[in-house]
Image (cartoon, helix red, strand yellow):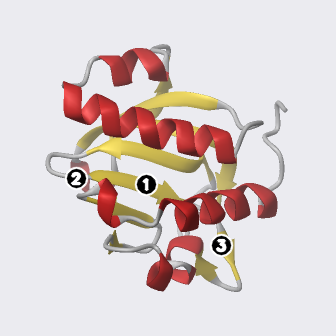
Amino acid sequence: MDIVDTDPSEYIGTLDDEDREVMSMLDKLITDAMPTRRRVLWHGVFWGGSEQTIVGYGDIRQPRPRGDDVEWFLVGLAKQKSYYSLYVNAVADGKYLGQRYADRLGKVNLGSASIGIRDLDAVNLDVLTELLTEADSITPPDPAG
């Protein structure tokens, strides 16, 4: 995956009405919780071989178990086929924040660093904002900012 020149707002604007509404709302929630973080569009082949477009917020260097560290995003937002994904690459007390907030987020599907959302009305947005604010506060500032 690489950062592309397309503005994230342009990408969100290309989505159908319902997806554009949900992605715009989540985009605002993330940028409000992390106002100093860089916002860019990533596109390419993701882990598992699927091609994706992800709005990335913040810059981190993520260690890999094998090989070199990678430049990545602190939080990512993606439209999947039938749900939305938030990738939160922040860890506290040895756990990804999504795992730490799991019992308070509402009805979501959790992976290690991913939060899958099918129905935004089933998510506790105040808790999601708290999670994003913590991710921002426990992660060093973006190198450029």
Can you identify the residue that label 2 sits on? 83
Residue placed most toward the observer, 72 or 25: 25
Q: Real-space Cα distance between discs 1 and 2?
A: 10 Å
Q: Where is residue 42 in the image (x, y as percent from the top left)?
A: 45, 32
Crowd class of label 1 (few under 14; some 14 to 19; many from 20; radius 10 Å): many
**Figure quadrant of residue 97:** bottom right
Q: Nearer the viewer, mark 3 or mark 2?
A: 2
The quadrant in which the C terminus is found is: top right
Mark 1, secondary structure of its residue: strand
Residue highlighted by disc 3: 91
Nearest to the observer: residue 80 or residue 66: 80
Residue at 33 percent across and 47 percent down: it is 46
Does residue 49 appear left or right of residue 59 in this picture?
left
Q: Residue at x 15, y 50 (%)?
A: 82
What amino acid type should be assigned to the residue bearing mark 2?
Tyr
Secondary structure under tag 2 reads loop
Quarter of the picture containing the N terminus is top left
Place of residue 111 in the rendered image (x, y in percent of width and height, measured from the top left): 37, 73
Q: In this view, does 89 lie above or below 79?
A: below
- Pointer 1: what residue? 86
Mark 2 crowdedness (10 Å alpha carbons): few <14, some 14-19, many ≥20: some
Amino acid bearing label 3: Val
Residue 27 has which mark? Answer: none
